[in-house]
Image (tube, rainbow, N blue to C red):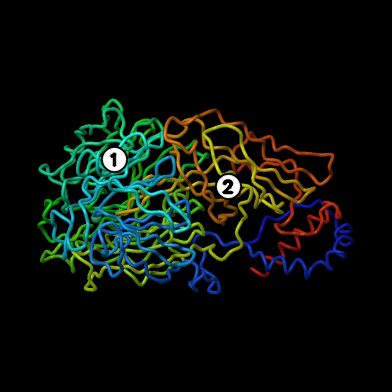
Amino acid sequence: MPRSTPSGPSGPSALAAAMLPLLALLPLLASLALANPAPRHPGEPADLLERGPYGATALGFEAIGDMGISAQMMFLSQSGKVYVLDKTENNPVTVSGKYGTHPAWAVEYDPDANSYRTMDVYSNTFCAGGAVLGNGTWVVFGGNQPVTTNGVATTGAGAYDDMDGGTAIRMLNPCSDKSCSWIQGTTSYSTTGDTGGWLQMTGRRWYPMVEVLEDGSMIVIGGDQNGGYVNTAAQDNPTYEYFPPKGDGQAINLQFLSDTLPVNLYALTWLMPSGLLFMQANKQTILLNHTDQTTTNLPTMPIATRVYPASAATAMLPLIPDNDYKVTLLFCGGSATTQWGNDGSPGYNVTAVPADNSCVRISPEASNPQYTTDDYMFEGRSMGQFVYLPDGTMWMGGGVGMGTAGYGNDKYSVGQSYGQAPVYMPAVYNFSAPAGSRWNRTGLSASANERMYHSTNVLLPDSSILISGSNPNADFTSAQWRTRTDIERWYPWYYNNPRPNLTNAPSNLTYGGASFDLDLGSITDQGVVSTAKVVLIRGSFHTHVIGFGYRMIQLQSTYTIDMNTGNATLHVSQLPGNPGPTLFQPGPAMMFLVVEGVPSMGQWVMVGNGQLGTQTTQSNAALPSNQVKAIQNTTSSPSGSTGASGSSASGSTTKSAAGLSVPPVALPAAVLSLCTIVVGLVSAVLV
Ligand SMILES: [Cu+2]
């Protein structure tokens, strides 16, 4: 795609004179254009020569290896390592630990080395919740009773040496040297007190929701006692509690969880800028004030059920300055079935029910919040999972076209799956595209592998997506749908493009305060520089197509282009001081510099002060206006804009192509403009 066309003032005679030295530069300019091809834009077809580190084509999947266990839960940590948890089952890899040598259900996976090490987790993590605290410690809550062979529940350590995970809490401080292990058992949370035994919650929670609060602590919500297809009153745990514990440490009743039986597991929950919690389960929606336990009813979820086991793809849309960080939630797919069975099974042929294809949005704290329909998906999908891409689009992959989440040995199960007709094709959703054009799969190809219930997808720092896991079974099996321990990666369209360099990035970000500068390098094309942005994706725990603690924000920024030095600088705000940490909770986040939709490699930063507790907020320092410093040192031309990201007004029309290495002071501005013409022509021919 050609770069912007300059509007040089040169007349014919000046043009002829200036062209002579430029002709000598043509080979150099051509080589520059070859070295830095203009990036494609989302949806453009892949160049078949562009391949990922293992040989796959951009926009495609690649099978890259195996991680020994099935990735029911997975997160990329700030150490660069991916931590994976499965349920207790007869996995082919083992670990030696506190209770002997047994099949492993936890691994640390190194995406750079494409290798893993097994880790010892004492209790059954089937099906837990988790997130990362504001201090960077990851915590996993709940699970199920010990099981022995064929997934049969037992009361003591079964054949696999697993303990009861119903009330268990496990913590991990990630490491890059293979030295870390899960903190569990009798280890106390702090040095000032001991839990008196196991790190544990107030009650059993299978399928608990976890959300991170503005002080970096967590709220752990709901769940049931012993598992099942859906919840029942007999085994419901309709309460929430905090971690670390607050107040008297006791669980607090939440009527909403009783009202939404039987479809209230992993109740969909997001912290809102006001500090209230948006909650959605069954068809009901509320805002919860968790401190005084009052609730406000919001509209009923239309069209379909979104919460597990309907399991829609859900996400908070990326938070952007252009709409004053308005919070909007998106729900896509799920199931419109009206019957739910019980904790034993669906009780009907659930696999014959087509998955829903609708998408709806709601902005919970807008005036008069309503669900509105969004662009529908290409097909019905239960258990599709959204993954934020740094360019602001959202990838969706996995799931099924028929049935729901859940599994069991019923006459209508397909193997042991309550879903069938896997969806092999991903799609990309662009929230900022005009209605009617938000879904795109141009140039994408299908995976060869089904990724069903208990599969997970995680963004890596290079913007590829790590994919593993699939349908669970009572125990590890190779029968359909088999227990999958293999790994795939998916590569975005820009995977092999030259990437922006994220240099001199801060390691900590605050809520408000002084801005910081990022060096954009030798780019002077205002059309390119004006696309530069900085985004953060918060560290998040992925399971059951939910990203716990998952949100993405674009920081406000402006730019200065200095034609004298040939460099550009991006001025970047800290996180918004108002509303502060309720908008983007403290804790580790991956930072990307994105130019023309192409991200840098992600770098981890700590948002907030790195500790649990009230975070300091202050007003954000004003950013300089967008500015192009003209070629002569005597003039500087502010744009007159007041710091809005993406403003393109300028007092100068002088532009230069990115990467041009001709010393700018050696040539007059008109000649630089002509250089841009030539580069533009060469690029137009070559691209
Ligand atoms: Cu599960």
- Position of 434 relative to 41 (above/below): above
- Position of 256 relative to 232 (above/below): above
Q: Name the quadrant of the N terminus.
A: bottom right
Determine whether, in the image, residue 513 is placed left or right of residue 464: right
The residue at which mark 2 appears reads as: 533
- Position of 311 relative to 44 (above/below): above
Image coordinates of residue 537 in percent, x first then y, are: 47, 48
The residue at which mark 1 appears reads as: 220
Residue at (25, 36) in percent of width and height: 240
Determine whether, in the image, residue 219 is placed left or right of residue 159: right
Q: CA distance from mark 2 to mark 1?
A: 34 Å
Is residue 302 among the parts visible in the rendering? no
Nearest to N terminus: mark 2 or mark 1: 1
Image coordinates of residue 520 in percent, x first then y, are: 66, 50
| Residue contact between numbered discs 2 and 1, judged by CB atoms under 8 Å | no
**Type of amino acid at the residue the image marks with label 1:** Val
Q: Nearer the viewer, residue 441 or 560?
A: 560
Determine whether, in the image, residue 18 is placed left or right of residue 603: right
Label 1: state its secondary structure: strand
Image coordinates of residue 174 in percent, x first then y, are: 43, 51
- Ligand 1 is found in which quarter of the picture? bottom left
How crowded is the residue under tag 1: few (<14 C-alpha within 10 Å), some, or many (20+)?
Answer: many
Residue at (29, 52) in percent of width and height: 312
Is residue 479 among the parts visible in the rendering? yes
Q: Nearer the viewer, residue 436 or 324?
A: 324
Label 2: state its secondary structure: strand
Residue at (81, 47) in percent of width and height: 631
